[in-house]
Image (cartoon, rainbow, N blue to C red):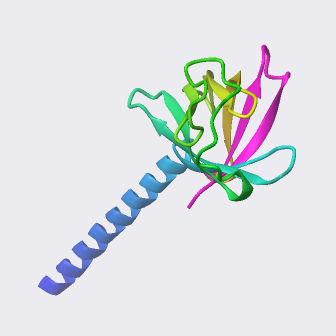
């Protein structure tokens, strides 16, 4: 009888652990926090790896981890930037700032295009169960902008 109770208890503990891991995976996939492969909306090519983090207060930022393929140029600098990032290395540069969750979207922040040096308002939404991130940079209203779909790195 003791082994039956022990076996049943082990199954309960195992089930609880599985539920905890599943909840943790869902929570991670339900936010943009993580590592993303950017896909250029014009060429369709993968360009960079971006790491999005939460500062602890719910505000998200993102930095360039590295370029991909022909875009992997560790010495490249943001010569077109006009703020404190002028002439700074693009690798390691924070390009997304001030994003906060607003229902099913994240907005209120900005995104920098390090190639043009231009700053845009930014809006992000999750797709495909958290495996894709639609990032929209725009001026004024969201209708006047461009979107890229980023793919979550595993």
The total number of labels drawn is 0
Residue 149 in the image, given as x and y percentages of width and height: 74, 45
Q: Residue at x 55, y 20 (%)?
A: 84
Residue 142 in the image, given as x and y percentages of width and height: 79, 22
* Range shown magenta: 130-154
User: Could you say which is closer to the camera, residue 146 or residue 20?
Assistant: 146
Q: Residue at x 39, y 65 (%)?
A: 18
Does the magenta-highlighted stretch encompass residue 131?
A: yes
Going by the picture, which residue comes out furthest to the left?
2
Examine the image and state in which quarter residue 30 appears: top right
In the image, is residue 59 above or below residue 75?
above
Q: Is residue 127 left or right of residue 2?
A: right
In the image, is residue 102 above or below residue 41?
above
In the image, is residue 64 above or below residue 37?
above
User: Could you say which is closer to the camera, residue 75 or residue 24?
Assistant: 75
Residue 131 in the image, given as x and y percentages of width and height: 64, 53
Residue 46 in the image, given as x and y percentages of width and height: 74, 54
On the rendered image, what quadrant is the N terminus found in? bottom left
In the image, is residue 51 above or below residue 85?
below
């Amino acid at each position: 009888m003791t082994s039956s109770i022990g076996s049943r208890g082990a199954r309960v503990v195992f089930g609880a652990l599985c539920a905890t891991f599943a909840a943790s995976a869902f929570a991670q996939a339900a936010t943009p926090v993580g590592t993303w492969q950017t896909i250029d909306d014009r060429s369709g090519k993968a360009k960079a790896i971006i790491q999005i983090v939460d500062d602890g207060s719910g505000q998200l930022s993102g930095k360039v981890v590295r370029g991909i393929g022909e875009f992997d140029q560790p010495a490249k600098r943001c010569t077109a930037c006009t703020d404190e990032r002028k002439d700074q290395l693009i690798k390691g540069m924070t390009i997304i700032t001030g994003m906060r969750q607003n229902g099913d979207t994240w907005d209120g922040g900005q995104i920098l295009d390090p190639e043009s040096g231009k700053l845009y308002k930014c809006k992000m939404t999750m797709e495909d169960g958290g495996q894709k991130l639609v990032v929209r940079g725009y001026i004024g209203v969201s209708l006047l902008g461009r979107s890229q779909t980023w793919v979550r790195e595993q």
